[in-house]
Image (spheres, grey):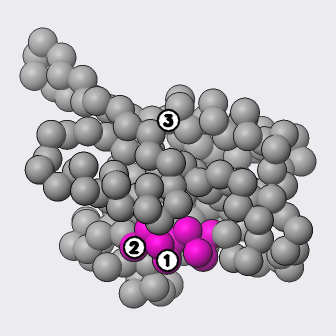
Amino acid sequence: MPPLHSSQRVAVLADSQNLYHSAHSLYSRNIDYTALLDAAVFDRELVRAIAYVIRADSPAEEDFFDALRDIGFEAKIKEIKTFTDGTKKADWDVGISLDAVTLASHVDTLVLCSGDGDFTRLCSHLRHEGVRVEVFSFGESSAKELREAADSFIDMSENPDKYLL
């Protein structure tokens, strides 16, 4: 990773669904959001931290949303949509992208915590606008094109105990 400067203004956007599914499929563990935020900010100035979550009517999810807020994340919550054929859908790709583009003029660095290849074009756009883009995710479940589109890729699988509970 290139040298970081303490004067950098940073926004951290965490795709909680992507992180959850990766952590559970690879390690059967949960993300340590405190450690993730600390590593992402890395002694720089945090402007905003947003965790994008899905409400799935699980008993513990309100506690999880509260814990995210206590850590320093703003929790943006989306309800699951159930279609007539029984399929369910809930993703934050458009919301994350819009927030990233909106925040771009207020930060020097955007940290995207996701391995979703749908964000490749977003990374390219932000870099074109002069924003440094850092991606935090698990290498095995991260799109190659996303890793290549970022200024730096932090493979959470290289030190899973640092990022997992």
Judge from the rendering whether residue 89 lies leftward or rightward of residue 143; answer left or right: left
User: Which residue is disc 1 drawn over?
Assistant: 35
Q: Amino acid at mark 2?
A: Asp
* Magenta region, residue range: 32-40
Residue 102: % across, % down: 72, 33
Residue 138 visible in the shown view: no
Quickly name the residue at label 2. Answer: 32
Residue drawn where x is 72% and y is 67% of the image: 152
Q: Residue 165 falls in which quadrant of the image?
A: bottom left
Judging by the rendered image, the residue that carries numbered circle 3 is 93
Give x and y (percent) for residue 84: 12, 12
- Label 3 amino acid? Asp
Residue at the (84%, 40%) spot, across then down? 105
* CA neighbours of label 3 inside 10 A, class few (<14), some (14 to 19), many (20+): few
Residue 80, above or below 13: above
| Residue 150, image x, y percentages | 71, 57
Q: Quadrant of residue 122?
A: top right
Q: Secondary structure at mark 3?
A: helix
CA–CA distance between discs 1 and 3? 24 Å
Q: Position of residue 90 (x, y in %)?
A: 32, 32
